[in-house]
Image: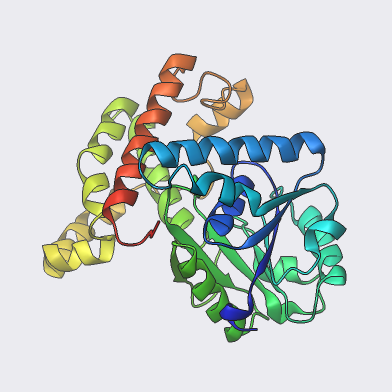
Amino acid sequence: MKMEDIKNICNLGTGTMGFGTALLFAKKGYNVRMFGRSDASVERGFHSIKATLETYKENQLVTEKEIPEIVGRIKGCTTIEEAVQNADFVIESIAEDLAIKREVWKKVESLSGPDTIFATNTSGLSPTDIAEALTRKDKFVVAHFWNPPHLVPLVEIVPGKYTSQETVDVTWKLIEKIGKKPVALKREALGFIGNRLQLALLREALYIVESGIATQEAVDTAVKYSIGRRLSTTGPLETADLGGLDIFHNIAAYLYADLCDVKEPSELLKKAMKEGNLGAKTGTGLYDWTPDGLQKIKKTRENILIEWLQKDKIMTF
């Protein structure tokens, strides 16, 4: 299978990630079959796609004329049999449950051609573990889009134990073609790259609050107005080189021993789970959220991410 041979995309899922991947492939001219478990879920997927395209239009990322053309390339399906028909590439964004994914992928494989590439959008499950349900394990790979997928460029490509280099290479080229920024891991690891870094930062941030060093507001402000801005232009390793490895070595020598190194979720997270305070979705978490406040921060995030899309060369609209 060559990237040029890929014409038809099977998109499993219509939720936050699923509608986004369907939109991205359709936007670049691919025929997409979007699977949802019910007519209602398919309808919600199309609603999200159309709303996102309106946002794109408002920010000159698509034209009025392009919107119906993009939507017209997407066919909603409520059976896997219909969704997988003639698929050259399958992208899956369903529940983060190993047993469910294995069951779905086993069915998908039985309905697919011999050259079809299978990609899961899991945020952390092992591609090797998922692929155990398959016969053509060499065709299976992780393509982890970051949320929200229509605004964040990165896609982590993660090979499993059985994944062929051809599968990785074709997936990379395809992801690049739809305007995303792929990065391939040399081998699989829990959390891949992004979530390992994100959770390391979260662990220390929670520790700073729990230890009484600073408030959550101070922690978030410190990140947003310092390393957050810098990391968007130079990664942590580039930053170390620019700052001087001798400087970072000396800081590491005295600071590492004082950093949090717990091996389980923090007490703050445990307490929140026990009390059912799960964050924005329940109205209370590390912060209290009002509908207006939540809408404001989401809109601010969206506007800033769109500004990045307009500035960088990664996304080509």
- Residue sitting at x 75%, y 56%: 98
The location of residue 271, given as percent across then percent down, is 55, 26
- Residue sitting at x 57%, y 25%: 281
Q: Quadrant of the N terminus?
A: bottom right
Q: Is residue 290 visible?
A: no
The location of residue 266, given as percent across then percent down, is 49, 38
Q: Nearer the viewer, residue 173 or 62?
A: 62
In the image, is 107 to the left or to the right of 126? Answer: right
Q: Residue furthest front?
A: 65
Residue 170 figure quarter: bottom right
Q: How many marks?
A: 0
- Residue sitting at x 55%, y 59%: 144
In the image, is 23 to the left or to the right of 179? Answer: right
What colour scheme governs how the chains and residues are painted in the rendered image of this protein? rainbow
The location of residue 313, given as percent across then percent down, is 30, 61
Q: Nearer the viewer, residue 121 or 251?
A: 121
Q: Quadrant of the C terminus?
A: bottom left
Q: Nearer the viewer, residue 113 or 264?
A: 113
Q: Nearer the viewer, residue 271 or 192?
A: 192
The location of residue 241, given as percent across then percent down, is 17, 68
Vertical relation: 128 (above or below) 271: below
Q: Is residue 122 visible?
A: yes
In the image, is 235 to the left or to the right of 297? Answer: left
Residue 44 figure quarter: top right
